[in-house]
Amino acid sequence: DAKTTQPTSMDCAEGRAANLPCNHSTISGNEYVYWYRQIHSQGPQYIIHGLKNNETNEMASLIITEDRKSSTLILPHATLRDTAVYYCIAAAWNFNKFYFGSGTKLNVKP
Amino acid sequence: GAVVSQHPSWVICKSGTSVKIECRSLDFQATTMFWYRQFPKQSLMLMATSNEGSKATYEQGVEKDKFLINHASLTLSTLTVTSAHPEDSSFYICSARGTDTISNQPQHFGDGTRLSIL
């Protein structure tokens, strides 16, 4: 599975968009990009995933570059409850083993 | 939908005892379940992959005789930490993936079990 690289931490003002980058330059053609977040002492929560097209759901948008070497998770209007560690994972659809990196600690501030 | 439940959420036991953790998919059938452990301030580490009706596949460095995994049905997998010692104290998390192996559906995670060995 492709290794992903994310910034250690980011700050965002409440109500503003949070843009979380992820680098996955060695991603294979059959690997999807999955985003999860983990709030302290809970299991990871699924946010969104995609292969090559941009995706949007009720939680977030996922922008994947044309060469698929990086992606950005966008939380359009961050709230204090979005403070969490966000993980970007590249994994093949058919086997789906997840190897978590260090993630990005997003701090949403009032 | 896609709810995964873990039980217990928190357990404290004496060194040398065995502890069983259950992972259930409540509203879907899971061909594959995964077990992770997480130490404080660290990321999740994949321990093993379990497929219903077959033996689990363990990641390198994970002792299969120490961490017994059973996936007897499409909605239940169990992890038994045998002869637990203080160094086994950790946050154990399971996840499940549905039976539709054609699609790219994500894993859904339980809320974890905090294990403390005294």
Image (tube, coloured by chain):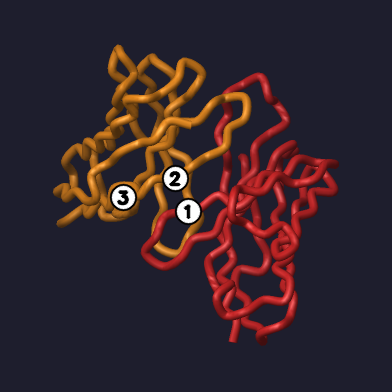
Chain colours: A orange, B red
Which residue occupies the foreground of this view, B7 or B87? B87
Marks 3 and 1, how far apart in space? 19 Å
* Residue type, label 1: Leu
Q: Nearer the viewer, mark 3 or mark 1?
A: 1
Give the labeled residue for mark 3.
A82
Q: Residues within 10 Å of mark 2 (few under 14, many from 20)?
A: some
Give the labeled residue for mark 2.
A100
Q: Quadrant of the N terminus of chain B?
A: top right
Relative to residue B4, is residue A30 depicted above or below? above
Q: Position of residue B90 (x, y in %)?
A: 53, 69
Label 2: element kind? loop
Q: How many marks?
A: 3
Is residue B10 toward the left or the right of residue B29 in the image? left
Q: Residue at x 16, y 50 (%)?
A: A11
Chain identity of mark 2: A
Q: Quadrant of the C terminus of chain B?
A: bottom right
* Residue type, label 2: Phe
Label 3: element kind? helix
Q: Residue at x 58, y 29 (%)?
A: B105
Q: Position of residue B85 (x, y in %)?
A: 62, 79
Chain identity of mark 1: B
Q: Nearer the viewer, mark 3 or mark 2?
A: 2
In contact (CB < 8 Å): disc 2 and disc 1: yes
Q: Respond whether the residues carrying marks 2 and 1 are from the same subunit.
A: no
For marks 3 and 2 on the same chain, the one whose residue lies earlier in the sequence: 3
Chain identity of mark 3: A
Is residue B62 toward the left or the right of residue B38 in the image? right
Marks 2 and 1, how far apart in space? 6 Å
Q: Which mark is residue B44?
A: 1
Q: Residue at x 17, y 56 (%)?
A: A109
